Amino acid sequence: MIKRKIITPKLPSINVHYCTGMSEAYYDVMIKHSVNMHLSLIEEDDDVYGFTITDELNDTLEIYIDDTLSPELYTKTAISEALNAGLSLIRRKLFYSFESNNPIVLGDDPDMDEVVIELLSQVVTKVLMAKYEKDIK
């Protein structure tokens, strides 16, 4: 398993785990979080290629991606999980910064839309590139 850490200023860090299969990812989750994903969360007929865990105690996001996928499926999975992580970061930043429980609505405020799209773009790019770069900051 290849592990990369993505650090975003003033936001939780993102740990990306490029696994040689989902069994390796499930085992890592079992060790770190004491959750058996086979029994608790995953149906037997589900095809899982990646998933994201929000760890609020350690203020991190953990992304697990199957590194053995075809390039097309790998890219789709990485983008999907990066978007999940990016949206989690946005929700946390807005709720903690503005103490607001109002939903984020795209189209209402062009400045907020730009912030949301920029942060999502950065996270997606970093998750895709972390596989190939040694140190992502």
Image (cartoon, rainbow, N blue to C red):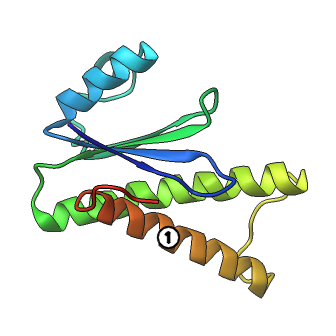
Looking at the rendered structure, the secondary structure element under dot 1 is helix
Q: Estimate the x, y position of residue 102 in percent, counting from the top left.
A: 84, 58
Residue name at image x 40 percent, y 70 percent: 125
- Within 10 Å of disc 1 (Cα), the crowding (few <14, some 14-19, many 20+) is some
Q: Depth check: 127 or 43 in front?
A: 127
Residue 117 visible in rendering:
yes
48 left or right of 85? Answer: left
Q: Estimate the x, y position of residue 77 in percent, counting from the top left.
A: 29, 57
Residue 75 drawn above or below residue 49? below
Residue 51 drawn above or below residue 130? above
Residue name at image x 32 percent, y 29 percent: 42
119 left or right of 115? Answer: left
Residue name at image x 58 percent, y 69 percent: 119
Q: Estimate the x, y position of residue 118 in percent, counting from the top left.
A: 58, 77
Residue 36 visible in rendering:
no
Q: Amino acid at mark 1?
A: Gln
Q: Quadrant of residue 48?
A: top left
Q: Estimate the x, y position of residue 113 in percent, counting from the top left.
A: 69, 79
Q: Quadrant of residue 127?
A: bottom left
Residue 98 drawn above or below residue 32? below
> Residue lying farthest right?
99
> Residue lying farthest bottom?
110
Residue name at image x 82 percent, y 48 percent: 96
Q: How many marks?
A: 1
Q: Quarter holding the N terminus?
A: top left
The residue that mark 1 highlights is 122
Residue 93 drawn above or below residue 25? below
Q: Quadrant of residue 71?
A: bottom left
